[in-house]
Image (cartoon, grey):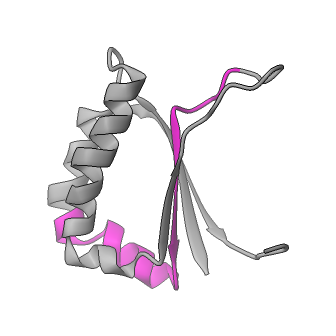
Amino acid sequence: MIKVIIGFNRKPGMGIQEFRDYRRNIHAPMLFAIPEAKKIRRFVVSYPIETQGSEKPGFDAVVEAWFDTVEDMDGLFLSENFVTKVDPDHDNFIDMSSIVRLVCEEIVVVE
């Protein structure tokens, strides 16, 4: 199983709730409307919460997406639909200079 983890911050001037609402109600439906998104096996968005003694989080959100193979992942992210329809929308809610992307082979230790 291949997993991509992407951490990012909202664009400057955008409130946290506006950022979350945009990602959930506008961007996510746009992504899942393209046929190549069927290659995603699991998709999770995590938002940091404040806890006593915790440091300020480095990101406003972290996305995790699982794929069967690297080819399936590339089939989504390199597709014309993603490149022309989904990717340009990131500018509307993400600080593009904040993006950190990690492609991993996931090995489950405990379930």
What is the quadrant of the N terminus in the image? bottom right
**What residue is rendered at 31% in x and 37% in y?**
21
x, y percent for residue 103: 58, 64
Vertical arrangement, residue 45 with respect to residue 103, above or below: above
Q: Quadrant of residue 100?
A: top right
Which residue occupies the foreground of this view, 19 or 80? 19
What is the quadrant of the C terminus in the image? bottom right
Q: Is residue 45 magenta?
A: no
Q: Is residue 43 left or right of residue 35?
A: right
**What residue is rendered at 20% in x and 71% in y?**
34
x, y percent for residue 17: 38, 27
**What residue is rendered at 36% in x and 19% in y?**
15
Q: Is residue 58 magenta?
A: yes
x, y percent for residue 44: 51, 58
Q: Is residue 16 left or right of residue 91?
A: right
Vertical arrangement, residue 5 with respect to residue 90, above or below: below
**What residue is rendered at 64% in x and 31% in y?**
49
Q: Quadrant of residue 7?
A: top right
Vertical arrangement, residue 72 with respect to residue 63, above or below: below
Q: How many marks?
A: 0
Q: Is residue 24 left or right of residue 35?
A: right
Q: What residue range appears in magenta? A: 56-82
x, y percent for residue 99: 48, 40
Q: Is residue 25 left or right of residue 77?
A: left
